[in-house]
Amino acid sequence: MPEVSIESSNYHIRKDLVNVHKEAWASLAGPGTWLTGAQRIAIVKGIREVLKGSKCAETQEALSPESVSIPNLNDGQLSNAQVELILRVVCDPGRLTKSWAKKILSFGMSEEEYIEIIGIIATVMILDTCTFGLGLPNTDPPAPKPGDPSRYKPPGSKVKAAWLPLVEPEDAVDADGPMYPNPKIGYITRGLSGVPQSLRDYWKVADSHYLPSKNVREFDQSIRAIDRQQIELIAAKVSALHQCAY
């Protein structure tokens, strides 16, 4: 398992949280479903380059985000479509449109690759925000692992309630692997289901930093060090700052 930044914190960090960071970085370095380990680590580095550079502010301030030129990230290891996807999702997600998503796909990116990249972005943002909040540097990305992507495509994946395909609970099959804790799970949980492994990887990280789905409706108790009201106050403030309408 790779070393992770939160291990060096002066605060007491839950052991399960440390383990989740280790497992997440190990997974990010390995081949995914549609991307190699090298491509996945290149995307991690691209996310961080975008956040450090001037393009985020330029994109947010532009009358049209599509007027902003695409930067050259990670020494050219990423395609223009991958870079634009990273830039817009990381820096200006509130102005994404269905027509823009179709444009990205028209550059030759598959729907499944798009979903896997979204999963990587969402995961890295959680991991890096956690270390930032603890006053620690980002974890160094581990070296990519060799191997080929599995290229598994769920047979029940289809475009229905979103711009990209997802798997409804009733369409899931055993080969997809475990995805949903119950058949009535909300669409926020189904979002990455077009690539089941990305869905599992993301929610393992998200649940450890917030709450597992089985505890979400337990408003009168908390499994964390602060009570539920405090958790939701923080969550609401963060959501408002990020203009998250969900």
Image (cartoon, rainbow, N blue to C red):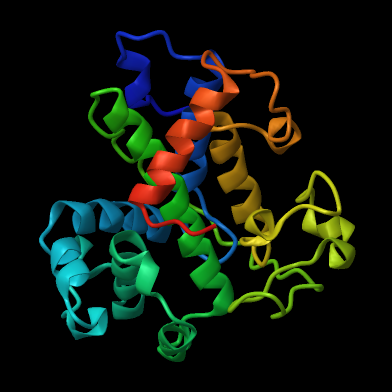
Q: Position of residue 86 (x, y in %)?
A: 34, 65
- Residue at the far left: name it: 54
Q: Position of residue 128 (x, y in %)?
A: 34, 38
**Which quarter shows the C terminus?**
bottom right
Residue 231 or 164: which is nearer the viewer? 231
Residue 86 or 29: which is nearer the viewer? 86
Question: What residue is rendered at 68% in x and 18% in y?
Answer: 221
Q: Position of residue 168 (x, y in %)?
A: 79, 66
In the figure, is residue 73 to the left or right of 80? left
Residue 145 visible to the viewer: no
Image quadrant where residue 204 sits? top right
Query: Against 2, is 227 above or below?
Result: above
In the figure, is residue 57 to the left or right of 159? left
Query: Against 76, is 212 above or below?
Result: above
Residue 50 or 46: which is nearer the viewer? 50
Question: What residue is rendered at 69% in x and 70% in y?
Answer: 166
Residue 133 visible to the viewer: yes
Image quadrant where residue 162 sits? bottom right
Count the marks: 0
In the figure, is residue 197 to the left or right of 19? right
Residue 31 or 228: which is nearer the viewer? 228
Query: Against 101, is 152 above or below?
Result: above
Question: What residue is rendered at 21% in x and 59% in y?
Answer: 50
Question: What residue is rendered at 31% in x and 33% in y?
Answer: 139
